Amino acid sequence: MLITSNLLARAERAGKAEQLRTFPKLRKAARTMASAVEVLMSAPEATEDRLVSLVEVWKAIEEVVPREKLASAVETVAAFVPVTDDDAAAQWRVELVKRYRTVQGFIELLLEVIRFRAVEAGAPVLAMVRMPRRWPRGVAATALATSPSTRR
């Protein structure tokens, strides 16, 4: 239990450190996008008497933020923000996989002592873990980290 707690804590700290490292880039990109959206939101509304041209709106936005800079900011935010919230712990699991080799020998001994069981979705992962000498390094750890059953 101590090794597991230590391993999980290290992976979580590494994930948070990466988030903090990338925060300034994300903040700058978000500010750029916010400036553009402020111009968009202040554009006059179209009425029956007045049409608002997309060309006019883009011209107003580009006076504040060049189009290339805005496109770069959108790419930056898209790279840092996941498409869905389904896998909020993905980065944490990636760090955990990096640390798998630390406990690999311990896991092999643990498998000799404890007979683990799994639900149907986790059975293939458990089968791989039970055969540690037959798969290349990191394969079981990668399978464990990316398995849909670990996401639930």
Image (cartoon, grey):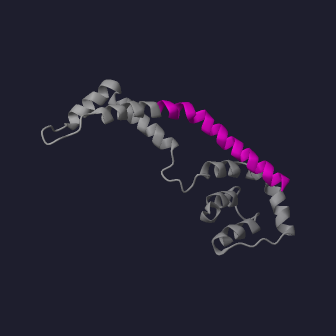
Vertical comparison of 119 with 150: above or below: below
Task: Find residue 131 and report its image quarter.
Answer: bottom right
Q: Is residue 79 visible?
A: yes
The residue drawn where x is 87% and y is 68% is 113
Q: Residue furthest left?
A: 49
Q: Residue furthest top?
A: 63
Q: Nearer the viewer, residue 18 or 30?
A: 30
Vertical comparison of 24 with 97: above or below: above
Q: Is residue 131 visible?
A: no
The residue drawn where x is 65% and y is 75% is 120
- Total numbered circles: 0
Q: Is residue 54 left or right of residue 99?
A: left
The residue drawn where x is 65% and y is 43% is 15
Q: Is residue 41 left or right of residue 122?
A: left
Image x and y of residue 75, in percent? 43, 39
Vertical comparison of 87 with 42: above or below: below
The stretch of residues the image draws in magenta is: 1-29
> In the picture, which quadrant includes the C terminus?
bottom right
Image x and y of residue 116, in percent? 78, 71
> In the picture, which quadrant includes the N terminus?
bottom right
- Characterize the magenta stretch by its predominant secondary structure: helix
| In magenta stretch: residue 9 | yes
The residue drawn where x is 76% and y is 51% is 101
Q: Residue furthest front?
A: 48
| In magenta stretch: residue 150 | no
Q: Nearer the viewer, residue 49 or 23?
A: 49
Image x and y of residue 97, in percent? 69, 52
Q: Is residue 55 left or right of residue 108?
A: left
